[in-house]
Structure formats: structure tokens, C-alpha cells
Image: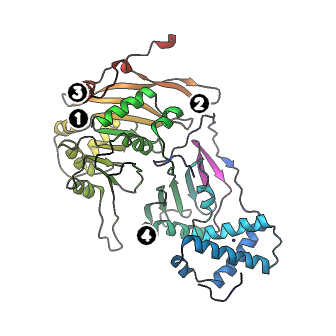
Amino acid sequence: MLRQPLKKVSRSNSTPVEQSPESKQPHSSDAEPELLELKTLTDLEHEWKSKVHERLLQMIDLSLIDTLGKDKARTEIEEICLRILEEESAPVNFSQRQVIVRSIQDDVLGLGPLELLLKDSTISDILVNGAKNVYVERRGKLYRTAVAFNDNRHLLNVIDRIVSAVGRRIDESSPMVDARLEDGSRVNAIIPPLALDGPSLSIRRFAVDLFTVEDLVELGTLTDSAAKVLDAVVKSRLNVLISGGTGSGKTTLLNVASGFIPEDERIITIEDSAELQLRQPHVVRLETRPANIEGRGEISQRDLVKNSLRMRPERIVIGEVRGSEALDMLQAMNTGHDGSITTVHANTPRDALGRIETMVTMSGVAFPIRTLRAQISSAINIVIQIERSEDGRRRLTSIQEIDGMEGDVITMSELFTFRRDRMDENKNVVGELVPTGVVPKFHRKLAGKGIDLPIEMFEHSWDQNGS
């Protein structure tokens, strides 16, 4: 690898779940993002990093880096960099030299300046708007950071390293891409000519240690009663649609809900970019594939849904339904593949059904409106709404059961609803998820399957505490 001889140096939230770290501490909603304090390189450290990096590139063949193991490559780079600093009599102490070496290792082997942010387990989103503007979301609040790339070419190299690792590409002919990091974190990149102010990179962090239902109860995302209902719904093989906006925690909730699936069942997961982190032993993970440079070879979610029906699935879990695959999903749910779970972008449970209806029409198959809605009402049993409030917290706001049809309208019964009381002095939303008093139709089905869910759990609570 050397061109000349030398002599001789986590728990993450939100994730895996689509990561959604929360905090019990109050947080404000300022108009301008604050500057997040991070330990970045000083001017002196940056100057010597550039000098050492330049000499390093003259001394080693980077094309051979991949032939070495990651640990061995890091060790060799460390030894070379320390030798260069010693030869140049760099006016930096031992601690500063270690910082410089780690930064160079991150540039050569990792994701450059992003490594500092990826090591921070409290950061849920990393948003790069060009080389010099890097923002992060921490505990539901957006911050600007002092992290920066050298230039747009440096940022493009990092983006290319990310997407090539999962067999995808990004260039002027294909300037948008979805990818993922090794830990499952979701990545979206868009570059010029579509991104006018330089390459843009968005990373949704995923957890190494997944959220459990107990974590969500502790964070206030849902109540203990709602968690027990969710457990019973999944175990009784009802079809569940999780609805919410961007960043509301749909994937996190889907990961938690899928944890209730018995371990002896065969599960097929289908995603555009693999994000789900199911813990059961019998899981087959499928991921879409974009077209190649000739425009061929694309495998869509609809293709995967159709193929999954031939794979003897006991459960089909679709990360997010967003197109014509909605038709095949409904057909699967209506033809014996019960217990399926998926998510959809929508602001209310009613809107979620409307979006499913719209996506079915994208398949090109024409249905009379009443027939289509009858298909939806018989396929989906439960709609769960989750939202991200203005205080940054993710909360389950509604659980609704689909009752059937009345004329051309799908009828629904709300079982739990989030009762919002006020905003406190720290601008945190104060409220609670409460039962509405409606006993679901599926309660009898649960009893028939030996699942004990006390009917008192659904008792009306509006008049409690004197309200």
C-alpha cells in the first residue's frame, strides 16, 4: 500500500426504528435555530490536518485501502499521520494530534465531518444544506452546528461513499437517491443541477438499541392501556395502518408494534430503503431496487408485494405504502394474509384512508368508488394516528376501528383520543391519551382467541379529575 517505506496510533435513539429521541426536559420553539455546541477542530488543528492529509495522499495508494480490514487501515493511517506530525515538528500537543489523526481517519475511511455527529446518540436527524451549512435535530428541536465540509466536492465524495456502499449511484443523470447507513439510518441525497445551492444530504438516525413499548410509555408517546390494546391487536392478527406526518415516529411505532408478533411466525418485510429492525428469528427482508444507468432492472414495492405472496408469509410488513402497491396490499389483506402492518403519510385517520384510496387508483385499475372503499374497509381493521407536536414530542393521538360501510362512506369508531389541555410555561403540550368509552367490535374476537383485554380499559374517562 505504501509508495515509499516508513518507520514506525452505543445506544442511539430513534431510531430503528425510524429514530425519534425524546426528552422529559422542557424545550422551547425559537424561530431561529440555535447554534449547537460541539467540539470541532481549532484553526491550528485544521491547518495541520490539511498539511498531514496532503502528505498522506502522496504516500499511500487509497485504491488499496479497501483491501485492508477497517481496523488495520485505521492503524496504518494513524501511524503514518503521527510520523508526519513528528517529522514536521508540529506545534500541537498529544491530545491535539489524536484529534487531527481521528479527523483524517474519518475523512479517508468514514463519513468525514459527519462522524462527529453520528457519534452523538441524542441527535435524531442530520441535515446538510451545502458544504458549510449543517443542522441537526436533538430532542425534537433544530440546531445549527459549526460542522462543515471543505467544499462541495468533499461533500459529494461523502455522499458517493454512502450510496455506493448499498449498490446505488448518484450523478448528474441520476441526481436523487435513497440509501442507508450501516446501522440502518435512512439517507436521502440530492445534488446539482436539482439542488441549486450545492449538494443536500438528509440522514434520519436509527437506533442501535431499539425502543421498547415500555420506553414509549415512559416518554409519553402512548399510555399503558393503549400499549396493551396494541399488543392485543397485533397478536389477534388484525390488519393495522399507522398514519402520521414526516418525522412523527411512524417507523418507530411500527418497530414496536412488530415486536408483538409471535416468534414462531414467518414475517416478510418490504421497504424502499431497509429501516425496520425486527427481532424475530424468522424474518425475510426485501428491498426495492432502482433502475440502472440504462433505465432497466427496477424492482418496485409492488413487484415485491406480489412476489411475497408466493413466499408463504404469515405476516407482511410494509415499511411505508406510497404508490400502486396499495392495491396488492389490500388484496393480500383480504385473501388470508391477516395480521399485516404498514404505515402511510397522512394527518388524520380519515385522511389515511383517503390516501390509500388515491394510491390504489395509481395502479391503473379502475374501481367503482363504493367497491374500492368496501375493499379498504374489509382489509384494514385498525388505524393508529401518531403526530409530532410543536414541543417536539411524538404522541399517539388516536386509535380508530373501521366498522364497515354506510352507503359510500367508510365508518370508523374512535377508541382512544388525545385530549389536549394546554401549553405550559415551557411551551410543552399538556394532555393525555384517553379512552372514548367505545368498546371495539374486535373485543369479542380477542376473547375467542384467549386474549384477555379488560373491557374497563375502554371506559369513558372525560369526566375524571373533575374535568
Residue for badge 1:
377
Residue for badge 3:
448
Instruction: Calculate the distance from the C-alpha at mark 4 to the C-alpha at mark 1.
Output: 40 Å
Corner quadrant of residue 26: top right
Can residue 117 be seen from the camera position used here? yes
**SS at mark 2 in the image:** loop
Pick the residue in front: 224 or 419.
224
Q: Are marks 3 and 4 in contact (CB under 8 Å)?
A: no
Instruction: Calculate the distance from the C-alpha at mark 1 to the C-alpha at mark 2.
Output: 36 Å
**Mark 1 vs 2, N-terminal side:** 1
Q: Is residue 205 above or below residue 73?
A: above
Instruction: Calculate the distance from the C-alpha at mark 3 to the C-alpha at mark 4.
Output: 52 Å
Q: Residues within 10 Å of mark 3 (few under 14, many from 20)?
A: few
Q: Residues within 10 Å of mark 2 (few under 14, many from 20)?
A: some
Residues in magenta? 133-150
**Quadrant of the image containing the N terminus:** bottom right
Q: Position of residue 277 (x, y in %)?
A: 42, 50
Residue 169 disc label: 4
Instruction: Calculate the distance from the C-alpha at mark 1 to the C-alpha at mark 3.
Output: 22 Å
**2 vs 3, front mark:** 3
Q: Is residue 256 above or below residue 185?
A: above
Q: What residue appears at the point 55 percent right and 35 percent down from the top-left corner? A: 390
Residue for badge 2:
428
Q: What residue appears at the point 34 percent right and 71 percent down from the top-left corner? A: 292
Q: Is residue 180 left or right of residue 309?
A: right
Pick the residue in front: 336 or 396.
336
Q: What residue appears at the point 33 percent right and 67 percent down from the top-left corner? A: 291
Can residue 436 be seen from the camera position used here? no
